[in-house]
Image (cartoon, rainbow, N blue to C red):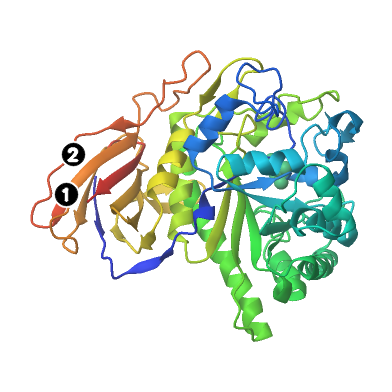
Amino acid sequence: IRASLALDPAFTVGDVDPRLFGSFVEHMGRCVYTGIYEPGHPTASDAGFRGDVLDLARELGVPLIRYPGGNFVSGYKWEDGIGPSADRPTRLDLAWRSLETNQVGVDEFVPWASGLGAETMMAVNLGTRGIDAARDLIEYCNIPGGTYWSDLRRKNGALSPYGIRTWCLGNEMDGPWQIGHKTAYEYGRLASETAKAMRLVDPSIELVACGSSNSSMPTFGSWEATVLGEAYDQVDYVSMHAYYEQRGDDRDSFLAASVDMDRFIDAVVATADHVRAVKRRSKRVDISFDEWNVWYLKKFAGEASLSITEAPALIEDVYSVTDAVVVGNMLISLLKHADRVKIGCQAQLVNVIAPIRTTPGGPAWKQSTFHPFALTSRYGRGTVLRVEQRSPLYETKWLGEVPLLDAVAVQGEDGVSIFAVNRSQTEPMVVDVDLRAWPGYRVESHTAIADDDPDAVNTAEDPERVVPKSLKVPDVDGGRVALELPPLSWNLVRLG
Ligand code: AHR
């Protein structure tokens, strides 16, 4: 197969907001308990957080973490998670039918996230609660002192305010499964009034309104239009969520998941801009893609009926080489839309559909999907270049004809990174790249996720089965270079 790419530093999409490489920690399954937090673990800090997980999260490179949910937040009382740990109540969490001990709350999570260099993106409960709980929480977090809630934070040990910048106004409020599910109009009004009160507490914050839970929701499109119709002036972002999985043996369609993601983003941007036009505003509402990943949802049905326990093992998907290629391709999709997608959160960070897995009391390891994320977060900072791509197409049952190649390029401080996926399961692809705009540049490295066994996975026993491989570097000749992408592969090519 032959394809080509032309790039030029003059043709740009936009600057990458580092928050595009965010993650998500929900009080769900073993993400918090025996995930990031496990007092008594051999690597645990005095505060009870696992050092091995912290190191891996740092290596993953996540500058922002959404917290504490997810569906969990729609039944959460944040006040349960503050004060002396012995006095905190154990509650029934209805989202995941689990026991929530509240040993981790805002005063534990925010310092933990800061310790790994990440800001917290906090979600407020607009399911069972509303304006009052939200304004109290932001007062607790962001006011320096001299008020009831800020003084309580100080009494609880945090003398400086947390200065949380980005806030989510609830979670997936369009979903009938959500506790406190609302119509678009009901939610739009509540989001608008909650946003207003929160901004009166701290005018410097940014706010995210809930968009649709996925593009298959029957209300998709009209939900965004109605919600933004009510809340446009009060919010900065509208959220998007998307999870993909391979259905049956249709791997060709699965490999094209990011084509669906591209179309989904374009549709939400068009809807937000439609509201902007109707309202005659100059302000733009951008995208917070605050849940995305591969998730084998079909397998989840059995776990949902589990009896109520503490930190049950929920949706601990084991990811393959193919899943890693799809995850890498989803990151390409986010980068291609860097002009409008400012925040991205891979869901979730540890154990729950996560790049990091742990055994309670035992090791932590990297799933296959860890690698494309860590490399994109590291080398995908800078300015996204508009690549002119020519690629043969292939036919998929799900999305019709789609390109075999998907690629994006990012100009960083020390060179250019090309991220590219070859969706052919059988054929290598030669990509002719026109580099004449960068005289003297050479290919510094070519790293790929590819394997003779596309179903290979990492496990606690064999955590290095799937790792990035260094490929032979081709010469640049007359400003052109021919890159060879293995079949079914995700690739990072560094030029400098
Ligand atoms: O990430 C798992 C769950 O998926 C989240 O709680 C919810 O928001 C979404 O449906």
Of the numbered discs 2 and 1, the one sitting upstream in the chain is 1
Q: Secondary structure at mark 1?
A: loop
The nearer-to-camera label among 2 and 1 is 1
Q: Residue at x 66, y 18 (%)?
A: 41
Q: Residue at x 69, y 64 (%)?
A: 205
Q: Percent position (x, y) of residue 209?
A: 71, 62
Q: Residue at x 47, y 35 (%)?
A: 59
Task: Classify 320 as above or below 9.
Answer: above
- Seen from this angle, which residue lies furthest left? 478
Q: Does residue 348 show up?
A: yes
Q: Secondary structure at mark 2?
A: loop
Q: Which residue is mark 1?
A: 442
Q: Which residue is mark 2?
A: 473
Residue contact between numbered discs 2 and 1, judged by CB atoms under 8 Å = yes
The CA distance from mark 2 to mark 1 is 9 Å
Q: Percent position (x, y) of residue 330?
A: 48, 48
Q: Which mark is residue 69?
A: none
Q: Is 387 in front, or is 354?
A: 354
Task: Please state if 441 lies on the left or on the right of 140 as rendered.
Answer: left
Quarter that holds the N terminus: top left
Picture quadrant where residue 298 is located: top right
Q: Quadrant of ligand 1?
A: top right
User: Which residue type does callout 1 highlight?
Assistant: Arg
Task: Please state if 7 lies on the left or on the right of 354 as rendered.
Answer: left
User: Which residue type does callout 2 highlight?
Assistant: Val
